Amino acid sequence: MPYNIAMVSDFFFPQPGGVESHIYQLSTKLIDRGHKVIIITHAYAGRTGVRYLTNGLKVYHVPFLVIYRETTFPTVFSFFPIFRNIVLREQIEIVHGHASLSNLCHEAILHARTMGLRTVFTDHSLFGFADAASILTNKLLKFALSDVDHVICVSHTCKENTVLRASLDPLMVSVIPNAVVAENFRPLTQHASDGESSALVSPQPRNLSRNDTITIVVISRLFYNKGTDLLIAAIPRILATQPNVRFLIAGSGPKAIDLEQMIERNVLQDRVELLGPVRHEEVRDVMVKGQIYFHPSLTEAFGTVIVEAASCGLYVVCTRVGGIPEVLPEHMTVFAKPEEDDLVRATGQAIAALRANKVRTERFHEQVCMMYSWTDVAKRTERVYGGISGALSEEEFYGYRGVDDGKSWNATRGRAGVQSFALIDRLKRYYGCGIWAGKLFCLCVVVDYLLFVFLEIFAPRTNIDIARNWPKKPALNAQASDAGGSGIGRKRSGRHRDRPEG
């Protein structure tokens, strides 16, 4: 059955990134499958109000203050009036929040539960347990997920991390990985005739000799957690031992100045090229210029960019951290510890394997096409929606039947479709979040409920106009859906269609 779904996150286009791409691709595939999907995010420079993107995807840009890395200032309650207006206007049934650091996501889940809506949360990242920032983030995550119907993680490592951080029942957490639009990340071809599209020609084996130059590509935000310090330390050592190797680096961030200083200090201007930030639809054009993709991340829940690199026919050198080992098979990757020495060793091993022609990178694209599909991600997410809405029974959703003793499943365990909307049950769940935090969370829930009652009285639902739905097109089969409806990442349809709402 079709659902009306609201995707909520601080992170969305025009900002590039894995979370942003995930929300867009999942939304378009759900629309292809007959559901209604809207996006709620904050306003970006030059992008405010209501916009329509490709495939009739409507985006609400809420004018909230951004404080750090596109995250809005937490207010807890001020978002409720406009959120309620949007939800009622669009007749939303399920609110799906994304990203642990998104303030809009957590507030939307709180308000949605107060309004009696089903909620889902997708976690895209990994966090620690010892530093002050992680402790605070984990406590806020526990607050948000104490009253959520189901949680989705992008890898099994991410699931373990989220279950521990938020003290969740593992049964209420599903693993649904990211995907890529493989058609947008085709490798270069060598024998395309004049006037013939390279997309129609199968890639040929690339035989490298000892004197051929190997280009190592890096496309990443230049932040500490992305391993930029390791990159800066490893580049001079790799280039010192590999004479016919160069680096091509795209991305921006606070570590960019350190990278530039390293190049100046070691006089590597002719062997290291910095491209700066690139748009998502330009990523493929950068990747196909190289033979190896270098990914020195210190923490990663999934790592969509390495799937894109493999789809372009690049051999991947990456750190064995987080969920990265789950992403690609071993014949596509060379793993290293998140240490300078091991990264230098792994890169040398990858270069040697390519020069000896031991790696058939021309087959990577077809293999990635078979492994990852956004249509499959949409189907699995749709099944989660069916579980929390009651369309699937407990046995269908979990794969087995629980003991029917009246105690196996209750409001505090979070069985899909059983989370009670009663205020007293919600308070019980929040009260268990800590000696002091539990009481504070209960107070927030009570105030949120009183605000909801106030809005129902002084801003009645009857005064809110129902929005007209975008005309639905016939449902696409899986093959056609994979080939189409993926405007972001394609030069032809990657531009947003902005139009005022009627």
Image (cartoon, rainbow, N blue to C red):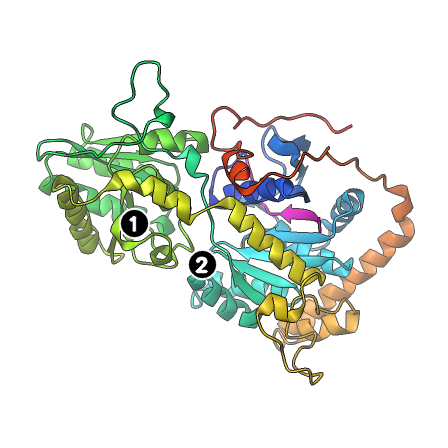
Q: Residue at x 30, y 29 (%)?
A: 188
Which class describes the residues within 10 Å of circle 1: few (<14), some (14-19), or many (20+)?
many
The image quadrant of residue 203 is top left
Which class describes the residues within 10 Å of circle 2: few (<14), some (14-19), or many (20+)?
many
Tell me if 448 is positioned left or right of 244 in this view.
Answer: right
Give the number of the disc on residue 296. 1
The image quadrant of residue 57 is top right
Residue 459 appears in the rendering: no
Q: Which region of the structure is painted magenta?
A: 1-13
Query: Which residue does the numbered mark 2 point to in the structure image?
Result: 155
Q: Is residue 132 above or below residue 285?
A: below
Tell me if 298 is positioned left or right of 5 in this view.
Answer: left
The image quadrant of residue 55 is top right
x, y percent for residue 159: 48, 64
Q: Is residue 366 above or below residue 49?
A: below
x, y percent for residue 276: 36, 31
x, y percent for residue 214: 18, 35
